[in-house]
Amino acid sequence: MTYLKTHIQWLDEFLPEGLPVPSSTLISGPGGTGKPLVEFAFVDAWLRAGGTLIGIPLQYPSGEFVKTVMKKLYNLHIKEYQQKIVLIQFDPSVKEIERLNEDTLKANMLKPEIWDKAIAEAEKLLEKTELGTMIFGSALNLLLFNDKYKNRIVNKLRDILQNDKSRTYTFAVSTSAFAHEIEDLEKVADNLMFTRMEKPMKLLLKIDRMKDVKFSKEEKEVPISGEMLQEINEIAEATRKMRIPEIRKI
């Protein structure tokens, strides 16, 4: 197994040996506790180390929000990484998969059978690299608001986290709803992390376990400004209010 050093000071304090590759990481916690911002630290490190990325950021209405946040957080310009990152934009109105441009697909990720197809299509747009592909997804708990697909989606996510070692995964989920289902995912992930917020807008991270690597068990503050946390929370909340009724109707 190899290890990815992030070269991000606060994250290296948690993971002095790095992130095990391949492995699955689940970042869990109540809604509005900055989980995607922690996830984006791994995204930044992965790209800079030469890997390729497939993103499934459900809390953002378009891939442009991901690009803006990465620039603000880590001064990373995604446009400089052509053929290194593909974003899958969630759209429950799409029958299966549509290609929007050279780095963005649109897919109905509510259907478990679409996951493998969408990822395969995304990989066709990526270069082959020695480090391989990381798949990151955030606000995946939104998919559970559909009664028809909920159990199948949970089973799909559980299978990915527990069994797929062909790629590295980093997922972020909220425990504010469907806590029992999220707990099932927490049990099977190789690496498990928890976030919480303290007033006024203070993001705290604690690592519960890691696969075959030393880590700090101390809860520590993540040095992200309150303004950035507030901005991201507002975007996520607006998307949640729009998406949940839409997802429930399908």
Image: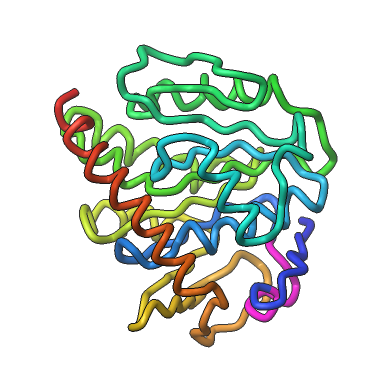
> Is 74 left, or right, of 238 in this rendering?
right
Identified at 60% across, 83% down, the residue is 216
Q: Is residue 136 above or below residue 187?
A: above
Identified at 47% across, 42% down, the residue is 57
Q: Give residue 145's position: percent from left, percent from top.
A: 20, 40
> Is 179 left, or right, of 87 in this rendering?
left
Q: Which residues are magenta?
A: 12-19
Q: Give residue 221's position: percent from left, percent from top.
A: 51, 82
Identified at 21% across, 55% down, the residue is 177
Front-most of 122 and 68? 68
Q: Is residue 196 above or below residue 39?
A: below
Front-most of 190 and 51? 51
Quadrant position of residue 83:
top right
Q: Quadrant of the N terminus?
A: bottom right
Identified at 51% across, 43% down, the residue is 65
Front-most of 81 and 112? 81
Judge whether residue 51 is colored magenta.
Answer: no
> Is 129 left, or right, of 221 in this rendering?
right
Q: Is residue 86 above or below residue 41?
A: above
Q: Give residue 94's position: percent from left, percent from top.
A: 36, 16
> Is 129 left, or right, of 174 in this rendering?
right
The color scheme shown is rainbow
Q: Give residue 24's position: percent from left, percent from top.
A: 56, 52
Quadrant position of residue 158:
top left
